[in-house]
Amino acid sequence: MTTPIIRVKDVHKSYGKGPNRFDALKGVTFDINEGESVAIIGKSGSGKSTLMHVLALLDAPTAGTVELEGIDTSTLKGKKLNRARNKTFGFVFQQFFLTANISVLENVMLPMKIAGVRRSERKARAHTALEQLEMDDKASNKAVNLSGGQKQRSVIARALVNNPRIIFADEPTGNLDTATGGNVEDILFALNRDKGITLIVVTHDDELAARCDRRIYIRDGLLVNDTTEVAA
Amino acid sequence: MNALDLIGTAASNTFRSKTRTVLTILAIFVGAFTLTITNGLGTGINRYIDDTVTSIGAEDVMTVSVSQDANTGFADSSGPAEYDPDAIASDGFNRPGSTVVALTPDDLETLASIDGVLDVEATKSISPNWIQSGDGPQYLTSVGGLVDGQTVQLAAGTAPSADSDAFELNVPISYVESLGFADADAAVGQTLTIAITDAERTQHLVDATIVGVAEESIAATGAGGLVVNDALTDELYSTQNIGIALDEQERYAQASIRFDAAATDADVTALKERLTDAGYTGTTVADQLGTFKTIIDAIVLVLNAFAIIALLAASFGIVNTLFMSVQERTREIGLMKAMGMGGGKIFGLFSLEAVIIGFLGSAIGVGIGMLVGTGISSVLAGALLADLPGLTLIAFDPLSVTVIIFVVMAIAFLAGTLPAARAAKADPVESLRYE
Ligand SMILES: Nc1ncnc2c1ncn2[C@@H]1O[C@H](COP(=O)(O)OP(=O)(O)OP(=O)(O)O)[C@@H](O)[C@H]1O
Ligand SMILES: [Mg+2]
């Protein structure tokens, strides 16, 4: 069997200390294989975002290990960690996080700028990504002037411009109407299907969850149900 | 992110909040402007003093006289000083009626033998009765010569030639009108008659050519009188000494000695000590103007301190501006970190922004400071300071101007480190947390 792209072993995550200590994750274990689309589902406050942050190496677990392609991520520090973040992940957030007063193109180029890609190549790749999302005509518009759906498509362009292995999407359709949301979902699943990019979606939305290969249910920091295990 | 992108991004971030940035730049501008003006004041005045020093004497020349134990005219606790037959009344050099002990040829030999003395030349003291141009009125004046290395700041013509056998002299520009010439240029080439009385009370007239007109300055050569060449000095001196026994003639109030031009301050001090040990007092031109310069430097230092205080106040503006922009851009910082931008680069991004603000403020401040300073100088040179030709009150030299810009940028960088460090430390998860 091939090494899973992400392997989570008994991960705990606590916030605060002493009497204020709160255990957001109380020991979760699962694997995600390359090319899968996975939904992380659960009630508000159950620990979904916390889990996603740990998977995306934005936060270190209090206990337990997260392996990325077989490498214990606690051994990744400084430059290596930054390289892993930059090369491996793309992010799509509910609240977009576009820089308002610069152009869409500049926003999309940001991950490549961080990676140190030459300016001419940056531009070419950003335009290609925007074209893919039918957003190229808005490239020189300021991000603040876009509609919600256009913003989210710009964000997806930014997420995929560095050819990531995994795209993390935290409530990607939460701020969009049903039609626009459905459109954004189509784009994400197309990327998963056509390019083999692993898709990890955090959502409340059962319909979106149903479109994923697999669903991981979280309640009060514990994994309560994993559809692959059910199937097995 | 490579260095060029970092600078480019910082530059465009600087102007994301235009009003705030412009106000901060303005605060820096005020400080840099003040610093430029005060610094220019120091440069201008000191440059003027330096020019004056070159005009009164070469820097490797020392004036030597015999050291005296008691000041005539003042009560001395150790009793009156003993009468010295070599004491002569010196004219024009000391207070009227006071005496100095004259230097004899023996003294000159002793001086020449002192270690470090390259050359000794007695200063021949000449007292003409009057000078006259054509049939015009007669005027009182004093006479001085040029030592090797001395220059005259000229308004017209040339300095008197040291090698020439002809009698040549310079007159100060203030004499031109009194002597009946239209302007400085008209005076050049004219003849001036000098009347001088010898020891037998006979008056002699000597004709000399005016070869140049000297600018007036705070310490002009020849104490603001005529500047004559060696040929004329010798002529006047021998005329003045007619009737004095030959062995009595060679009495000088002071002499000029020359030392190695490359001598350090320590060498000069050591030479002065050797002179003192031998019973002489040596004074350099630098000694005469040194105190003046020290005072100017001290005043400029105080003024600079005020400017620096203004800059420090402005640097708090930078701290404030950057904290606000770190605050506003929390999410952006979090996102960049999530995308793999290192803390060091984030720090660089914000501290560069501070440096850019500092650079703009200082460059504009220095630029406008130089314009205004030059303007003030030229206005004052024609009015308030017209009596001090050659003085540019506020002058600039490229080095100190560059230093100002770099100092301000360094202060700005230091001010930026605080907010930049906060940005660099920001936790990406914290920054991305939804409200
Ligand atoms: N920095 C923190 N300090 C203290 N508690 C925290 C912190 N971050 C998260 N929590 C707590 O951890 C729990 C899980 O939070 P998390 O954001 O993962 O929930 P979620 O499942 O994403 O909820 P939602 O669906 O509302 O986004 C919550 O109870 C939250 O209050
Ligand atoms: Mg959440």
Image (spheres, helix red, strand yellow):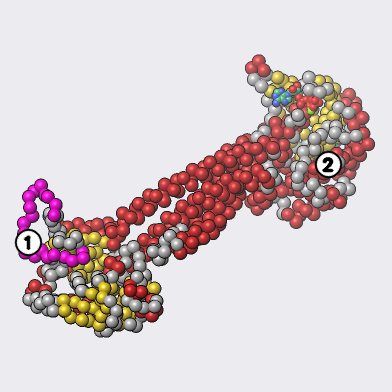
Which residue corresponds to the image point at 67% horizontal and 45% vertical from the top-left? B19
Magenta part of the chain:
B73-93
Q: Which mark is residue A9?
A: none
Q: Position of residue A78 (x, y in %)?
A: 64, 39
The main secondary structure of the magenta stretch is: loop
Apparent side of residue A154 relative to residue B278 in the rendered image (left or right): right
Q: Is residue A211 magenta?
A: no
Apparent side of residue A213 relative to residue B221 in the rendered image (left or right): right
Which residue corresponds to the image point at 32% horizontal and 79% vertical from the top-left? B210
Q: Which residue is mark 2?
A: A151
Looking at the rendered structure, the kind of residue marked 1 is Asp
Q: Which residue is mark 1?
A: B84
Q: Position of residue B254 (x, y in %)?
A: 18, 66
Note whether residue A1 is visible. Answer: no
A120 and B351: which one is in front?
B351
Apparent side of residue A151 relative to residue B340 in the rendered image (left or right): right
Q: Position of residue B350 (x, y in %)?
A: 63, 43
Note whether residue A54 is visible. Answer: yes
Q: Position of residue B432 (x, y in %)?
A: 73, 33
Q: Is residue B296 above or below residue A205?
A: below
Judged from the image, the quadrant occupied by ligand 2 is top right
User: Which residue is at the far right?
Assistant: A179
- Label 2 chain ID: A
